[in-house]
Image (tube, rainbow, N blue to C red):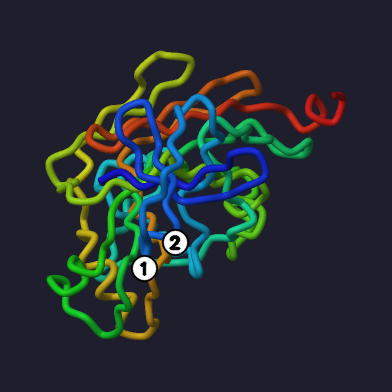
Amino acid sequence: MIWCRFQKNNTISYGIVEGDYVSQVEGDPFAEHRPTASRYRLNEVKLLIPVVPPTFYAIGSNYRNHVEGRAQVKGTAPKFYDTPRVGYRANSALIATNETIIKPKDAGENFEYEGELVAVIGKRARNVTPQEATRCILGWTIGNDVTERDWQKADPTNLRSKNADTFKPMGPWIVTGIDPSSMFTQVRINGMALHTFPTGNMLFSPGEVISAISKYNTLSPGDVVWLGTDEVPQSLVPGDVIEIEINGIGVLRNRVSAEAQVEAH
């Protein structure tokens, strides 16, 4: 099943996507819901971020190639962690597919993307095993963990480098009943494929990550867990269109604009 969150005129609703149509639902996928008689073409509605998460978790250093590649860029030895290295991200940074990533005026050249699988929590999880954690996942979506690398060096909390407005595209929707371990992630800029990697080739599986979080933090329905990337990113520049595709889920597509360009309109 494909769940989306969309806006039609002034109304925001959840819906179920079937082909080129979305059927409006009363309620949401995390609680009671029922279908309505309203049905629209997808091109007649605005897709929103598929969920507004109560808590937004993200893991770093979860793919071998990314750890080794980033270490090479920095001129350091790769560091692999014994447990999932999980942090938080800001909801205010979230934008939907087809919305614009804004590069701030004072951002440097090392303005990079990270294509990520995102687990959407469907059931409360506290102190669960990896197997139990897997059963707490409602479904999957796609994230782009945009990062300003120069800021990141002097920003231990990632306040600017990863959490600035528009730095966290997520979407286009939530897909349930699929196994991401056999999927592939592809990153394209302006239509050119730059990276393709096995989505499930993680150092820590989704169940292991969620289990580790749940030892100390209660996960709630609607929480999202971003699961890392396997590429060594290139830099984005204003005018670029970045697409992140995970087969079985869909395509997250966003354009990059400079802050000054946006203010000029």
Packing grade of label 2 (10 A; few <14, some 14-19, many >=20) is some
Name which residue lies at 42% across and 52% down: 25
- Residue at 48% across / 29% down in the picture? 253
Q: Quadrant location of the C terminus?
A: top right
Q: Amino acid at mark 1?
A: Glu
Secondary structure beneath label 2: strand
Q: Is residue 34 above or below residue 96?
A: below
Choose between 11 and 107: the one closer to the eye.
Answer: 11
* Left or right for 168, reference 83: right
Label pair 1/2, CB-CB below 8 angstroms: yes
> What label does residue 32 carry, if any?
1
Q: Residue furthest front?
A: 37
Residue 30: give x, y in percent of width and height.
Answer: 37, 66
- Name the residue nearer the viewer: 105 or 166: 166
User: Looking at the image, which residue is at 62% across and 47% down?
Assistant: 11
**Would you say 135 lies left or right of 79 here?**
left
> Horizontally, is 227 left or right of 235 in the view?
left
Coordinates of residue 204 in the picture (x, y in percent): 22, 60
Q: Which mark is residue 27?
A: 2
**Mark 2 or mark 1, which is nearer the start of the sequence?**
2
Q: Quadrant of residue 109?
A: top right
Up the image or down, 22 lies above or below 209; here it is above
